[in-house]
Image (spheres, grey):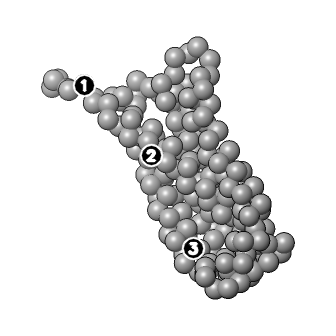
Amino acid sequence: MADTGEGKSFGLLFEAWAPAVFGVLSLIALLYFGKPIADKFATHQWTSTGLYSAIFGWAAIQTGFAFGVYGFVIGKSGGFIGALRGTRTMERFERYIGRANWTGFILTFFTIPLIIVEPNLCDARSVSYVSVAIWFSFFVWAFLAFLRLAYNFGALSSVKDKEFHGA
C-alpha cells in the first residue's frame, strides 16, 4: 500500500481493482461452464446447502473483522495511525475497510434466503442458476476485498509506535 505520490502504479491498480475484476471473471466462468456445473448438481455429485452455510459463516466473520478494524482505526488518534491520518494511503485504506464491511454485510444478508429456499441449480439457463452465479461471484469479490484489508491491516499494524517516555 506504499504511495509514492507519482501516480498510480500497476501494484496500486491491481490492489484496488483485483477483487472486482476476479469477481467478474468468476461470473463469466460460472456462466461459460454452466452446463457441466449444473450437471454436477443434477446428478447430486455436488450440493449447494453446505456452500450457502459456509459462505454465510464466512461473511459474518468477515463483517465482524472488518468492523473491528474500523473501530481500531477510528479509535486510534496517535501513533502510526495518527501519522497516516489525512494521507492518500489512509484514505485508500479506509475505503478498503468500508468495502470489506459492506460487501460482507450484503453477502450475509443475501445468503439467508439461499439457505432457506435452496434454489434449483440443475439448469444453467435458469434464473436460479444465474442468480446463484452472481451471488457466488459477489462472494469472490467480497472475499478478495477482505484479504486485501487483512493484508494491509497487517502491514499497518506491524509498524511500532514510538515509546512514550513522558510523565
The residue at which mark 1 appears reads as: 162
The residue positioned 67% from the left and 85% from the top of the image is 43
For the residue pair 165 and 53, the one nearer the viewer reads as 53
| Kind of residue sitting beneath label 1 | Lys
| Mark 2 secondary-structure assignment | helix
| Kind of residue sitting beneath label 2 | Ala
**Which comes sooner in the sequence, label 2 or label 1?**
2
| Mark 1 secondary-structure assignment | loop
For the residue pair 38 and 71, the one nearer the viewer reads as 38
Which mark, residue 145?
none
Label 3: few (<14), some or many (≥20) within 10 Å? some
Quarter of the image with the C terminus is top left
What is the x, y in percent for residue 124? 79, 72
Q: Quadrant of residue 162?
A: top left
Q: Is residue 9 left or right of residue 117?
A: left
| Kind of residue sitting beneath label 3 | Leu
What is the x, y in percent for residue 35? 77, 71
Q: Nearer the viewer, mark 2 or mark 1?
A: 2
The residue positioned 62% from the left and 52% from the top of the image is 141
Q: CA distance from mark 1 to mark 3?
A: 46 Å
The residue at which mark 3 appears reads as: 51
Residue 154, visible in the rendered structure = yes
For the residue pair 27 and 161, the one nearer the viewer reads as 27
